[in-house]
Amino acid sequence: MNCSEYRANYAEFDKFPLPREVWDTPEWTAWIDHFHQCNECADWDLAQRVIKRGYDPQSFPCVHIADQITQTCDQHPDPHDCPDVLIVYAPRFDEYAIPIRDGGPSVVCIRFCPWCGVQLPESKSTRWFEELELLGYDDPFLQDIPEEYLTDQWYKNST
């Protein structure tokens, strides 16, 4: 199977759960084998998932990060609590991290995508604290800070 055939069969074979009579065919076997052997089609497949969730994969550093960040869980509204969420994103700091599930909100910040190695944006957390300190805030987590500093608007408005 080539990439064109893989993509042409996507709508039929990417429905889960698949009935046994579908996944027990040589066509499906060739399709899934191609998925496992072709990085380009595997990334394209991830992009389709992100698009189905209502996001533009191009607005993320890479399709792997896009797939991770756009996942949701009915059982765990907070991504830090979901064992299936491998990467979390803090928009206010433009920071990607791996959650440490030790009962608190601990994370390990990452600078590169674990799947493809693309460089992720540098965390803006130090700049966030510095800017708020210049505005007179010495403990921004306990003080009422300007609304734009609760989101990514503070750095998007300054660039």
Image (cartoon, grey):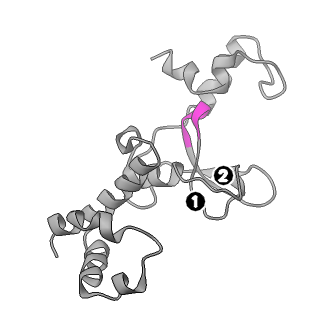
Q: Quadrant of the C terminus?
A: top left
Image quadrant assignment for residue 127: top right
- Residue 94 covered by magenta stretch: yes
Residue indicated by mark 2: 79
Residue drawn at x 36%, y 86% as measured from the top left: 21
Place of residue 83 in the rendered image (x, y in percent of width and height, measured from the top left): 66, 64
The span picked out in magenta is 90-95
Residue drawn at x 56%, y 31% as measured from the top left: 124
Which of marks 1 and 2 precedes in the sequence? 2
How far apart marks 2 and 1 lie (CA) works out to 9 Å
Q: Is residue 117 above or below residue 4?
A: above
Q: For this rendering, which residue is in front, 21 or 94? A: 21
Instruction: Classify residue 148 as left or right of residue 50.
Output: right
Instruction: Classify residue 16 as left or right of residue 148.
Output: left
Tell me the amino acid under the disc marked 2: Pro
Image quadrant assignment for residue 20: bottom left
Q: Disc 2 or disc 1, which is closer to the eye?
A: 2
Q: Secondary structure at mark 2?
A: helix
Q: Quadrant of the N terminus?
A: bottom left
Residue indicated by mark 1: 86
Counting labels gives 2
Place of residue 80 in the rendered image (x, y in percent of width and height, measured from the top left): 69, 53
